[in-house]
Image: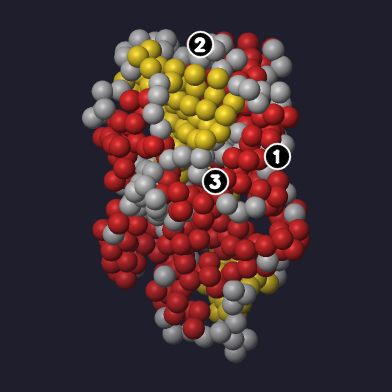
Amino acid sequence: MLLLPKLLKRFVRQGRLTVITPDNKRHVFGPGPGPISFAGQNKIAPDVTVRFSDDKIEREIFLNPELALAEGYMDGRVNFEDGSSIHDLLSLFWLQRKELRKHPLQQVIRKVRFKIRRFRMHNPLGIAGKKVKHHYDIPTDFYRLWLDETMTYSCAYWHSPEVGLEAAQKAKLRHLAAKLRIEPGMRVLDIGSGWGELAIYLAKACGAQVTGLNVSPDQMAAAQKRAEAAGVGDAVSFINKDYRELTGSFDRIVSVGMMEHVGVAHYLEYFEKIRDLLAPDGIALVHCIGRVGPPGFTGPFFDKYIFPGGYAPALSEVFAAVEQTGLWHSDCEFWRRHYHWTLEAWRERFMAQRDEVVVMLGERFARMWEFYLSACSISFDIGGDMVFQLLLGQHKSAVPVIRDYVTEAEQELEQRGF
């Protein structure tokens, strides 16, 4: 331990971190576990014991904390003892992230990553689909292990954390449908349709004719089977295309969890395409992960292993693109804690099926997803991530001037069993 001690002594101000080195020595940092207040919440500062299996991992973590820690855990070079876990360590790091960022070396690294971010997020036709497939062409059976019955892999809409995952996902479908004000026979485009639950819902609940865009053949095939089983196979179709390749006109356009894959350099192109596909009285809804602060970059672990080319934008980046298209900003809603509750539900279900995941895809993959789900859950809990829903129209009167219509439509859908 030559590089990390000074950093950790300065860094760990809350909780306790015990590092066991390959020579079996224990190095303790921090004042100890206990109650703390952070970001308006009462928390218990974690007590974490981590074991390094070789001497190189210390230097690697010092130079590139996020990626080296993730890869060290994935490869079994970083392990946990005394009942602690990777989730506990990531919680400890997040509570004191500002201290880590003050280190001069980390400041230099962050500046470099910000400068090259547009290159990393360059997603032209032919490349964009390959990047998305990196994540979504994992076998559907894997996702079936821990998603709920709706097979919805995006943020749920929670009236409270006690309602349960499936109820919250169904509430999200109602919320989206209510905002879109869909009438029977309307043509709806779902950009990034996943396993088809939203498309199926809009066809059944609203009588819409839905076209789903998807670049994953595995997902698309599963979605079509689900639509046919739900009795709406003639009302829903799924197309394997990039959004930029599509032509036609749609009364409504919805995009849930897809804009994260567009790339900053393509935001104007994305919103111009939505404008061009949207009918004269049309409404578009874009649901996307965002950041509460200024523009940033995607962390190296997520860029390498989870969402290559992906990015959660600042609103300033989104609005700057939309304002050049002539589309009207009709509404913007912020979901601050909803994704934390969603991710905690997913993480709990994933861990319950972890042994099955290992059989299916291996221990390294299981550890990678543990890291991913934990990091995301913590970021939406005490970090700067949130979800925004942007409602856009071709003109000023595309939607009512107050939000009462959303609640009324949700109640009507629920009364009809949707």
Distance from Cα at disc 2 to Cα at disc 1: 29 Å
Mark 2 burial class by Cα count in 10 Å: few <14, some 14-19, many 20+: some
Instruction: Provide the secondary structure element on which disc 1 rests.
Output: loop
Instruction: Provide the secondary structure element on which disc 2 rests.
Output: helix
Instruction: Provide the secondary structure element on which disc 3 rests.
Output: loop
Q: Residue 368 in the image: x percent, y percent?
A: 59, 62
- Between label 2 and label 1, give the one nearer the viewer: 1
Give the mark nearest the N terminus, 2 or 3: 3
Give the mark nearest the N terminus, 2 or 1: 1
Identify the mark at residue 405; answer none if there is no mark: 2
Q: Amino acid at mark 1?
A: Asp
Mark 1 burial class by Cα count in 10 Å: few <14, some 14-19, many 20+: some
Q: Quadrant of residue 250?
A: top left
Task: Report whether 360 appears left or right of 158.
Answer: right
Residues marked 2 and 3 touching at CB (< 8 Å): no
Q: Quadrant of residue 208?
A: top right
**Which residue is found at the position 63% from the left and 17% from the top?**
205
**Which residue is found at the position 58% from the left and 70% from the top?**
73
Of the 4 image quadrants, the one containing the C terminus is: top right
Distance from Cα at disc 2 to Cα at disc 3: 35 Å
Mark 3 burial class by Cα count in 10 Å: few <14, some 14-19, many 20+: many
Give the mark nearest the N terminus, 3 or 1: 1
Which residue is tagged 3? Answer: 216
Distance from Cα at disc 3 to Cα at disc 1: 20 Å
In the depicted view, which residue is nearer to us: 140 or 16?
A: 140
**Which residue is found at the position 67% from the left and 67% from the top?**
363
